[in-house]
Amino acid sequence: MSTFNDPVTEQDLPGIGRRYQMTDDSGQVITVIVHHSGRRDVYVPCRAHDVDAVSFTDDQARRLGAVLAGVYFKPAAVAQVEAVIGGLLIDWVTLHEHSPGVGRSIAELEVRKQTRMTIAAIVRGDSSFVAPDPAMTLEAGDRLVVIGRPEDLPTFLHAVVT
Amino acid sequence: MENSLIALGGAFLASALLARAGRKVGLPTIPLFMAAGIIFGPNTPGISLIDHPEDVELLAALGLVLLLFHLGLEFSLDDLAAGGRQLVVAGATYLALNLGGGLAFGFLLGWGTREALVIAGAVGISSSAIVTKLLVELRRLANPETRLILGIVVVEDLFLALYLAILQPVLSGSSGLRAVRDVVVAFLFVGAIVIVARKGAALVGKLIASPDDELLTIGFLGFVILTAGVAEELGVSDAIGAFLAGTVVAATVVASRVERLVLPLRDAFAAVFFFAFGLSLDPADASDVAGFVVAAVVLSFMLNTVAGVVAARLIGEGPDAAARISLTVLARGEFSLIIASLAVAAGLDARITPFVGLYVFVLALASPALAARPRWLAVVLRKTGAMPRSPGLRGRTAPPPARPA
């Protein structure tokens, strides 16, 4: 499981917004500026000039962020993609044909009781079900948004996904 | 122009077109709004949209009020506290040098003591608007010195508030006990509003808050304009009243919505303020003050360079960062013009208007070009031994430690 091994530094830029910086594997500093206006700038060092930058609107930045976070497509080489906020974990998992949860309802699986995780939403094709009905039957290809404690995730994955 | 709507519409459109042309070559808007006022004013040949600046006095006053209201709204002492000692030292050094130099320069001009105080402020305080915009547009936000530059600007904003609080009683020209009384009234008023901001923000929130954007806009406008008016009536200046109203609203629950709603209003009326300032400028006066302006620009340039070197040393950076700091904070704009307009209202030496107008014009137009090409100054600093060696790219490859996200 990945944690934030590389520190991302966060600083206030008075009158502009916030600055986040991290160092990549080659030692280059990547800077992200979140403007109060919602605009995002991404600065990358560049040989030709000192620095190159791209700007995004709030909406574009969120989409790009979702792509980077692996929401749409999780590379196979990566064990888990997750976000931990104050000890609470939010993760996305996709059910495949042989997932133990497929064909059974949330109530049958006793997800909350057995795994102490909660399925907060189900994304199925173009539609999404927020706070799904426990009677809802899971299908292959469903993307589940789950919330819980990080240490409970393996149990959940074992019981429902893998 | 007889029809005042035609005059005002023409003023807006002329300002917009001129500033848009300027944007293409990276010029800030403030000097171009002024230029529109000069070109379409009574003192130049051709069309005169508005013959007397007094005709748009109220709209221009709204511009000044909203500029300072927004400054108060965005102002946060936490920014200073978070920046720590470095930031305060850099800001204080900057102000000490530039205000001290400005004050000495003002006395050397021999226009009078009150005039010298006004010139110190007009020459000593950078333009928040232009500096911030330069940093964004020159893609400098990732640089190590950027936080320090923004910190210097925050310290200057804080100073501006204190300066405006004492300027008005001084400008009114009373002496002896009356002057003491005026200063006491000014500080009592400021103190009262600060207490309101700390304790009574919830009450003000109740007064102006509405889930409806329309009603919130009308509500906060009423609050800020009324506060500015009361301040003016008490002899404290509408500018400081508006700034303090901003700090009060900043503490309410509607702060972020007001920040968003006030922007288009501020931009519109501030443009009128700059345009009106341009109207009051007569190119014929320029030759009278040109020598003084050149001297003031050179002085500001030197003092900014010294301040830049001190600031760069504070954060362990070399001549490159020093040059970028110096040439960016050199920008002058809205605050200098606001201070000058207060002086005009108080009936000070008439030469202040053309002097500050031309000074702002030169530095507002020159600063983007100078800030974009800081290398030559870095070379000069290195060669003259003012700053021996750059610590290299350290700052660029390893950001200063901050708290982890």
Image (spheres, coloured by chain):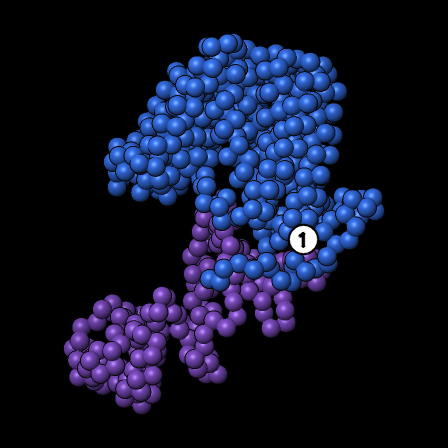
Chain colours: A purple, B blue
Considering every residue shown, the one lying at the far right of the view is B383
Q: Nearer the viewer, residue B332 or B25?
A: B332
Up/down of B156 relative to B38, above or below: below
Q: Name the residue: 33% across, 28% down.
A: B223
Give the percent coordinates (x, y) of residue A55: 53, 55
Q: Residue at x 62, y 22 (%)?
A: B119
Does any portion of residue B241 appear in the rendered image? no
**Can you give x and y, in whole percent of width and height, for residue B165 in the image?**
47, 24
Q: Could you tell whether B78 is left or right of B113 in the image?
A: left
Pick the residue in front: B191 or A26. B191
Q: Which residue is outermost to the bottom?
A: A98
Please name whichever residue, B79 or A75, is drawn nearer the observer in this view of the structure.
B79
- Residue B156 visible, this angle: yes
Looking at the picture, how far across and down is residue B92, in whole percent?
59, 37
B366 with respect to B232 (left or right): right
Indicate the position of residue B251 as horizontal and vertical percent values: 35, 40
* Number of dots carrying numbers: 1
Q: Residue at x 50, y 44 (%)?
A: B80
Q: Secondary structure at mark 1?
A: loop
In this rendering, the answer to whether B160 lies above or below B329 is above
Left or right: where A18 falls relative to B227: right
Quadrant where the N terminus of chain A lies?
A: bottom left
Q: Quadrant of the C terminus of chain A?
A: bottom left
Image mark 1: chain: B
In the rendered view, does B162 fall on the left or right side of B286?
left
Q: In which image quadrant can residue B120 be found?
A: top right
Q: Amino acid at mark 1?
A: Gly
Query: Which residue is pictured at 60% across the width and 42% down the height?
Result: B89
- Which residue matches tag 1? B316
Neighbourhood count class around disc 1 (C-alpha, 10 Å): few under 14, some 14–19, many 20 upward: some
Q: Is residue A76 above or below residue B113?
A: below
